[in-house]
Amino acid sequence: MQISSRAQKIEPFYVMEVAKAAASLGRDVAHTDAPMVFLNIGEPDFTAPPLVQEAAVRAIRAGHTQYTQATGLQPLRERISDWYAQRFGIKVGANRIVVTAGASAALQLACLALIESGDEILMPDPSYPCNRHFVSAAEGRAVLIPTTAEERFQLSAAKVQAAWAPRTRGVLLASPSNPTGTSIHPDALRDIHQVVRANGGITLVDEIYLGLSFEAQFGQTALALDEHIISINSFSKYFNMTGWRLGWMVVPERLVPVVERLAQNLFICPSTIAQHAALACFEPESLALYEQRRLEFKVRRDYFLPELQAMGLTVPVLPDGAFYAWADCSGACAKLGIKNSWDFAFEVMNQAHVAVTPGRDFGTAETAHFIRLSTASSMEHLQIAATRLRALLL
């Protein structure tokens, strides 16, 4: 059987490869006094709030399980629009909001709608690997631009301008970022967007962790800039609905019919049950619970990062959102006599029974020296992990 060249270009998602190895080893040690602690997957340990679960059950019992329109339930689009007004103080018309089968579907739709074969999309290095693969799937090419801790591992307007080439179509940013948990300052984002607009390009911003911002100066949506921004969001992270596979995108009004045609053909519609359940995300009781959980993620960050620093796993930039720590493990590698973060991940998996993610997935600019740790796990698991890592590294 001949495999398409498109499929052959897509590298494995090494996060999941490491996760499989950790899960396998985890089964072997499950009944010991040191079961595996998983800090490798970016999934909240919280599940959907009670009102959301109850709304799903009501939808099923009422038979609200048939197709919706491809752009999603109108009441849900309106609730999302209201959330932007209440949370960020901006007006985003419901007619610009397209509900999707997760943020992944939103990114795929955006790339298919806007990228021609051979187009180049500028992205920071490090960045989330699946985002660049969506570009590749649309027959474009992701151009990774190395970033530094001084730049918060984010692009700058100067770097975007310097990298702009005849085939450049635009930029794909993430704020807050996976794997670093760092956001783009609104002023820096405005400057980048001005460069992109001046070159006739597009600005796509992955904002799936925006609800999990911890600092007011960063916790602002890119949509505040103008109507030309394309924002991708999700019910997975802040709204704790990972397996429900529901997200949305905000696009310029003229792009909605294009995205709708693509969605009709590729997805038909997002999960109807998940959409009915998501309506309850915006009830005051649910929003209050989400805010409590957001503060709990901050408490976990504030505990775990000093622990990492004390054992030589340096986090060069304080994450201002999401639930990740992007830690330099080069000193720890030297102490253990190993080469890079890939080997380090397997060393701590086998010796400390702690699963972490090596930097290999996230780019090539110094990523071999970094690991990503998720602080989405419970405080108890973070404390156990810290104890085990200290025993190995100190």
Image (spheres, rainbow, N blue to C red):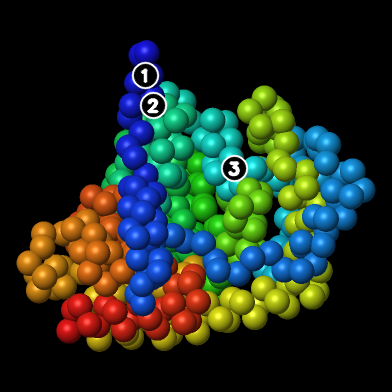
Residues at circles 3 and 1 in contact by the CB criterion of under 8 Å: no
Q: Residues within 10 Å of mark 1 (few under 14, many from 20)?
A: few
Q: From the viewer's perspective, is residue 311 above or below residue 178?
A: below
Name the residue that disc number 1 marks.
3
Residue mark closest to the camera, 2 vs 3: 2
Name the residue that disc number 3 marks.
106
Residues at circles 2 and 1 in contact by the CB criterion of under 8 Å: yes
Q: Amino acid at mark 1?
A: Ile
Q: Residue at x 20, y 78 (%)?
A: 392
Q: Secondary structure at mark 1?
A: loop
Q: Secondary structure at mark 2?
A: helix
Marks 3 and 1, how far apart in space?
A: 26 Å
Q: Quadrant of residue 385?
A: bottom left
Q: Quadrant of residue 266?
A: top right
Residue with the most extreme top position: 1
Q: From the viewer's perspective, is residue 96 above or below residue 236?
A: above
The residue lying toward the viewer, choosing from 381 and 122, is: 381
Residue 309 location, x and y as percent?
A: 27, 82
Residues at circles 2 and 3 in contact by the CB criterion of under 8 Å: no
Q: Could you tell which of marks 2 and 3 lies nearer the N-terminus?
A: 2
Left or right, 157 with respect to 145, comes to right
Left or right, 202 with respect to 69, comes to left
Residue with the most extreme front position: 31
Q: Residue at x 24, y 83 (%)?
A: 390
Marks 2 and 1, how far apart in space?
A: 7 Å
Residue 161 location, x and y as percent?
A: 34, 48
Q: From the viewer's perspective, is residue 36 above or below residue 13?
A: below
Q: Quadrant of residue 302?
A: bottom left
Q: Residues within 10 Å of mark 2 (few under 14, many from 20)?
A: few
Q: Quadrant of the N terminus?
A: top left
Name the residue that disc number 2 marks.
7
Q: Residue at x 80, y 67 (%)?
A: 51
